[in-house]
Image: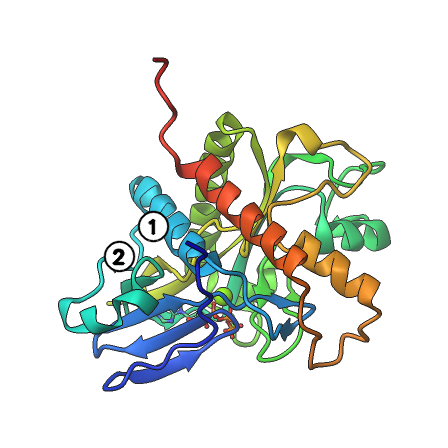
Amino acid sequence: MKESVVLQTSIPGLKLWRRGKVRDVYDLGDKLLFVATDRISAFDSILPTGIPGKGRVLTQLSAFWFARMLKITPHHLISTSLPAELSAHKDTLEGRSMVVMKTEPVAFECVVRGYLAGSGWEDYKKTGAVCGIALPKGLQQSQELEKPIFTPATKAETGHDINVSFEVMANGSGGVGQKLAETLRDRSIAIYTEARAYARTRGILLADTKFEWGIRDGKPILIDECLTPDSSRFWPADGYRVGISPPSFDKQFVRDWLISSGWDRNPPAPPLPSEVVERTAARYREALERLSAETRRAP
Ligand SMILES: Nc1ncnc2c1ncn2[C@@H]1O[C@H](COP(=O)(O)OP(=O)(O)OP(=O)(O)O)[C@@H](O)[C@H]1O
Ligand SMILES: [Mg+2]
């Protein structure tokens, strides 16, 4: 059966807490119902076409990683089972929802990079540094860094996030203070390092990733999604080479098609052709399978 696409949810009797680019989040009092839809965004626009099954992949992969990372940090996930009182909405919500603890989100995105890619590579070409962290001369695009680096960004209300230095995150205006900034940096790097080592065993390179943190009872916990193709750059190891931008497990087909369509990047974005939708859906499914499927035992 072909999976249907969930572009937007509306649950009578539940209060919508916020609608993000991908998630519909409902207020459950002290908790949140965190629903990953099949929406996809590219170039800062939400596209009119969804990717069937994408929300389920994001939810299942996040849950997989939250459990694995518990030894490093507490997180917001309480349950991926749908609360019994929502069973009437099973078709829409099951598999794509998490009940999570409501927190006060930290206003900085915690990015960790192990390779020189994306905005990190752009920054390095211009300044020889990434977010103020000086790097050796002569590095090439997509090259692995000697040590993973922490490059926070501010969550912009609209448009691109803005990269900032650790100093700004800690002590700038709106900064979180030295102690919390250090805790979030150290934990983010520890999770990245652990996930990268694991992903390698599955033939996937984790180039970089973004974590979000929230404060609950005065303590930081890991929130939002975790180590998904939307929040991370995953490269199939066999397509990796230094000096190029290797293919990744995310919106590559979508971005390539949007560029070739001649769209001027002002909303609204054009609808995606079905071939691009199907290839993208398959890519997300493959990321989930490769990372989280049990390894098969020899017969
Ligand atoms: N446990 C939590 N407590 C409070 N807020 C959370 C929690 N987990 C995630 N969030 C917030 O819920 C939203 C998730 O929605 P989604 O990922 O679709 O948004 P987004 O478009 O990425 O984010 P934004 O609109 O903030 O840029 C994010 O704003 C995220 O910071
Ligand atoms: Mg998000």
Q: Nearer the viewer, residue 51 or 67?
A: 51
Q: Earlier in the sequence, mark 1 or mark 2?
A: 1
User: Quick one: quadrant of the C terminus?
Assistant: top left
| Percent x, y of residue 201 | 49, 26
Looking at this view, name the residue that lies furthest to the front.
1
| Percent x, y of residue 30 | 21, 75
Q: Secondary structure at mark 1?
A: helix
Q: Is residue 18 visible?
A: yes
Q: Residue at x 30, y 44 (%)?
A: 67
Indicate whether 22 appears above or below 237. below
Neighbours of disc 2 within 10 Å: few (<14), some (14-19), many (20+): some
Q: Residue at x 24, y 67 (%)?
A: 217
Indicate whether 249 appears above or below 180. above
Q: Nearer the viewer, residue 19 or 141?
A: 19
Q: Residue at x 81, y 37 (%)?
A: 140
User: Quick one: quadrant of the N terminus?
Assistant: bottom left
| Percent x, y of residue 77 | 28, 57
**Based on the displayed image, in which of its 4 quarters is residue 294 positioned?**
top left
In the rendered view, does 27 fall on the left or right side of 170? left
In the rendered view, does 57 fall on the left or right side of 17? right
Q: Secondary structure at mark 2?
A: loop
**Based on the displayed image, in which of its 4 quarters is residue 276 positioned?**
bottom right
Q: Tag on residue 63?
A: 1
* Structural distance between the alpha carbons of marks 1 and 2: 8 Å
The reply to whether discs 1 and 2 touch (Cβ–Cβ < 8 Å) is yes
Q: Amino acid at mark 1?
A: Ala
| Percent x, y of residue 46 | 60, 74
Label 2 sits on residue = 80
Q: Nearer the viewer, residue 111 or 95?
A: 95
Q: Amino acid at mark 2?
A: Thr
In the rendered view, does 50 fall on the left or right side of 219? right
Q: How many marks?
A: 2
